[in-house]
Amino acid sequence: MKPMKIKQFIRKHFFNSFKSTINTLYLPIIIIVIFITGWVSTMLATAQIEENAYKNVNDTIFQTKNYLDNMLSDVFQQLVSLSNDPRILSLMDKQESEIKPSSYVEIDNNLKLIYSRYDVILNSVLVDLNQKKFLLYHSGYNSNPSVNYNNYFSKFSGSKEGFYWRNIHQDKVFNENDKVLSVFRLIDRNQSRSKGIVLFNLRAEFFEQVLNKSLIGENGYLALISPDGKYESKNVKEEYKLDQSTLHSLQKVKKESGQFSYESSVGEEMIVIYDTLSANNWKIAAVIPQNEMLKKVNYIKDFTIFLVALMIVTVVFLTNFVGKYISKPFERLAQQMGRVDKEHLDFKVEMSGPEEMKILHTGFKELIIRIHTLMEQIRLEQEEKRQLEFAIMHAQINPHFLYNTLYSIKGLCDMGLNKDASQMISALSSFFRIGISKGKEIISIQDEIEHIQHYLFIQEMRYGDDFTYEINIDEDILSYHIIKLSLQPLIENAIYHGVKQKRGQGRITINGYQAEDTIHLEVADNGNGIEPQKLKDILQEIEASYQDKKRFIGIGLKSVNERIKIHFGKEYGLTIASEPGNGTVVSITIPKTKGEMKEYA
């Protein structure tokens, strides 16, 4: 579809329809309100649900922790009491033959009482002194227990009192096919070389039941984290299990409670909420996939999206229906108005219908007449404005330049250089003669080149050897026309902002050549150039309106560009190219014209 047809299609189906106007203006507002309302409601609901979900998990951990703390503290107290029993400690230094049967009976009764009272958590209990010289135990197994002292006394150390907790492991004392958790005390009397072990094996089934009482999702679970490993309450897929780095972080964390998240091996976000058991400083942690934990949140979001979409569809339907009903009286007037554009400002068709339509028709007709008048007035005002601006430029340039030149001539006369002073006076008179040009705005390129030659001669006399210049103009273009004072402002800029800012001798080159139906005139200098951002700002300022505040350029460059565009068209005008350190080139592009032209002034 061609650009013009697209434009006509848009105007016909969107902008010339009162119904479309209603849809365009009000429908987005209604949709935005619905969207914001749905979004805010979703955020509030999901925030509350998330808070409840985290609170439920924290409550679960808190309750489970309290129960485990009570049970483990009781068991540990029994272990402490039993291991500190003077009867047991007194047997450490006795030979097997010296131990009385009554000692076995008394300690066995105590051991049996502990085992029966805490059988819900105790899998087995054992007292072994000096590698079976004194051995008592109670368990559900018929096997004869065997304790490897080397494994225990070489692997476990660092506790001042000799108490240790051990996470899930194989029960190598009673039954290697079973797994238990354990708490034990290692008694080591270095002076008498006596050693002993008081061991309580804890049922893994007890911890499984306790930790699985609270359901925290299909793939969520509770875990006991200790420095020597972890116990997970149920079997889950490998990707939901704690990886080594996360497990290590939990083992090393100093905070008693908290929460964090990590990414599983399959890229799923996992939530970990933990607390610390006071009985043994183990961490009890809830590990839950975020999607499961916030399943209700996702449901709320999906439902809200569906509801918002349904409301938007309903609003679109109702808005179209109401807009169509309201717009019918305006369609005929809109069709007639649609035929009016900047090329055809006539509006002669009479309107019939409701009184309101007639009032609109009359008002629009009067508006067209006023537009005609205002457009003509604006055209005249713009023409006067351009003339005034050009006059102001002349008023700014000529006295300043004349003052500087006369002052230089005076200096030459004072030094007795009358010949040089005479040449400057001749150049000055020729400069103003061409500048006046009998009031003409359009002159030949030859006259413009002669004009700048006088200007450059005067400036060269003023500044001495500070700069040199070269003029290379194709003779075939000298007879073509150009707007007066097009090159002089460019050369002035090249002198004051180009070569004068450069160390050493500056050089200005003026080139002129033709390319097909256009003429190109360039003013180049070897100054310091312009930074890219500043060049961008200058180019924007040249194209900006006169009302905009000028920061980088004066009226000269802008006036040259504006006058060229007014006389020859918007495709012609002034361009600037520059690189820091490589000078600046200002180019003018004008068409090849001869003969009479519309005068600017």
Image (cartoon, rainbow, N blue to C red):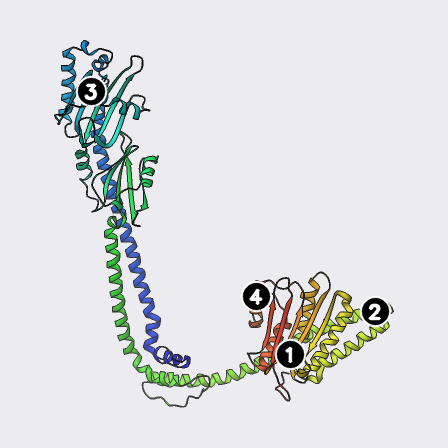
Q: CA distance from mark 1 to mark 3?
A: 112 Å
Specify the quadrant of the image occupied by residue 140: top left
Front in this rendered view, residue 208 or 77: 208
* Sequence-earlier tag: 1 or 2: 2
* Sequence-earlier tag: 3 or 2: 3
In the image, residue 60 lies at what x, y percent? Answer: 22, 40
Specify the quadrant of the image occupied by residue 137: top left
**From the viewer's perspective, is the residue at label 4 or at label 3 nearer?**
3
State the quadrant of the N terminus: bottom left
Q: CA distance from mark 1 to mark 2?
A: 37 Å
Residue visible at 26% across and 43% down? 241
Mark 3, secondary structure of its residue: strand
Front in this rendered view, residue 576 or 436: 576
Q: Residue lying farthest top?
A: 98
Q: Which residue is mark 3?
A: 127
In the image, residue 588 lies at what x, y percent? Answer: 62, 76
Q: CA distance from mark 4 to mark 3?
A: 91 Å
Q: Which residue is mark 1?
A: 513
Question: Which dot marks residue 412?
Answer: 2
Residue visible at 67% across and 77% down? 485
Q: CA distance from mark 2 to mark 4?
A: 41 Å
Residue type beneath disc 2: Leu
Residue type beneath disc 4: Asp
Q: Is residue 4 left or right of residue 483?
A: left
Q: Report crowding for label 1: few under 14, some 14 to 19, many 20 or more residues within 10 A (C-alpha).
A: some
